[in-house]
Amino acid sequence: LMDRAQHIQGQKIPKKQWQAAWLLKAVTCIDLTTLAGDDTPSNVHRLCLKAIQPVRHDLLRAVDMHNKGVTTAAVCVYPSRVADAVKSLKAANSSLPVASVATGFPAGQTPLETRLQEVRLAVADGAAEIDIVINRTLAITGEWEALYDEIREFREACGDAHMKTILAIGELGTFTNVYKASLVAMMAGSDFIKTSTGKESVNATYPVAIVMVRAIRDYFLCTGHKVGFKPAGGIRTAQESLVWLSLIKEELGNDWLCPLLFRLGASSLLADIERQIYHHVTGQYAAYHELPMA
């Protein structure tokens, strides 16, 4: 696993003329996220506007992508901010989905009934996607059936909303646990499995990601059902986003290289990608005030 991870990280990045295309592909897979205690309607509004127009119009025009509808895949917020995000997107006439974390994010250490109610309320407020966290205690103690039952209940509470299941891999201890948790989450009806909340000390690492994507591949080979993958936490540079795309292309194939089956959970990543596209177009690096971030 470590060797495979090193191989993928060590690969050459796409040649210059293709780099902008790969970076824009990464943009379309981003769940643009704000999960802070000081989130307000105004910074959520700015986030939504950035999601709708993630790269400056003149830069898109320079690479002939200005009329291709380049947006991020979704915006992701806390349950209490879902209504704000839905309102902002509606006002901007955008059909971009709002994702909400739920189920006692990030620790998942609240009563089951509370966690279920949180999902229902977020969906009622207009969330089209729910990023749930598993109860790590059940995984660590090997209570896989109980974990399955909980995730099934979350699935039911989501209704028509897509469900992404966060495994919090930094707290699962072993690769074996990560693999088993991945399978249980998929069997219980997850549309995506996601590495981390971004609040653990260890987030999306390549070796653990390879375990998860191989579980996705095994599940697909057994059932014919494709489940998506979302790394999250600590993904900050354009270079890293290219490594993630490369990992998906190599391990799962081109089918997975789309927002339906691949997302990048990130908040500061977009700013760096936009800087790199600016450099690709102009040959210079932008001063920070030239590319204001959400």
Image (cartoon, rainbow, N blue to C red):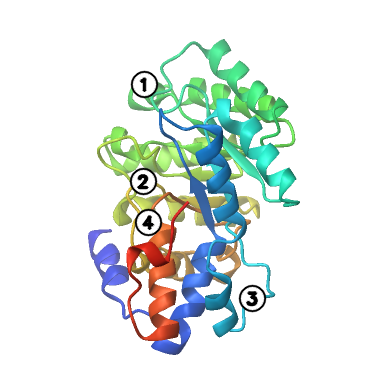
- Label disc, if present, on residue 210 of the rendered structure: 4
The quadrant of the image that shows the N terminus is bottom left
* Mark toward the start of the polypeptide (4 vs 3): 3
Q: Position of residue 13 (x, y in %)?
A: 35, 79
Q: Nearer the viewer, residue 119 or 90?
A: 90
Residue displayed at 40% across by 28% down: 37
- Point 61% across, 24% down: residue: 119
Q: Mark 2: which amino acid?
A: Gly
Q: How many numbered marks appear?
A: 4
Outermost residue toward the front in this view: 289
Q: CA distance from mark 2 to mark 4?
A: 16 Å
State the residue position of label 1: 137
Residue kind at label 1, given as amino acid type: Thr
Q: Earlier in the sequence, mark 1 or mark 4?
A: 1
* Mark number displayed over residue 66: 3
Of the two numbered discs 2 and 4 on the same chain, state the one appearing first in sequence: 4
> Which amino acid, by three-letter code, is at mark 4?
Ile
Q: Label 2 belongs to which residue?
A: 233
Mark 4: few, some, or many residues within 10 Å (few <14, many ≥20)? Answer: many
Image point (51%, 50%), residue name: 32
Q: Which comes sooner in the sequence, label 1 or label 2?
A: 1
Residue nearer the viewer, 53 or 23: 53
Mark 3 neighbour class, 10 Å CA radius: few under 14, some 14 to 19, many 20 or more: some
| C-alpha gap between disc 1 and disc 4 | 23 Å
Q: Residues at badges 2 and 4 in contact (C-beta under 8 Å)? A: no
* Disc nearer the start of the sequence (2/3): 3
- 242 is higher (above) or lower (below) than 214: below
Label 1: few (<14), some or many (≥20) within 10 Å?
some
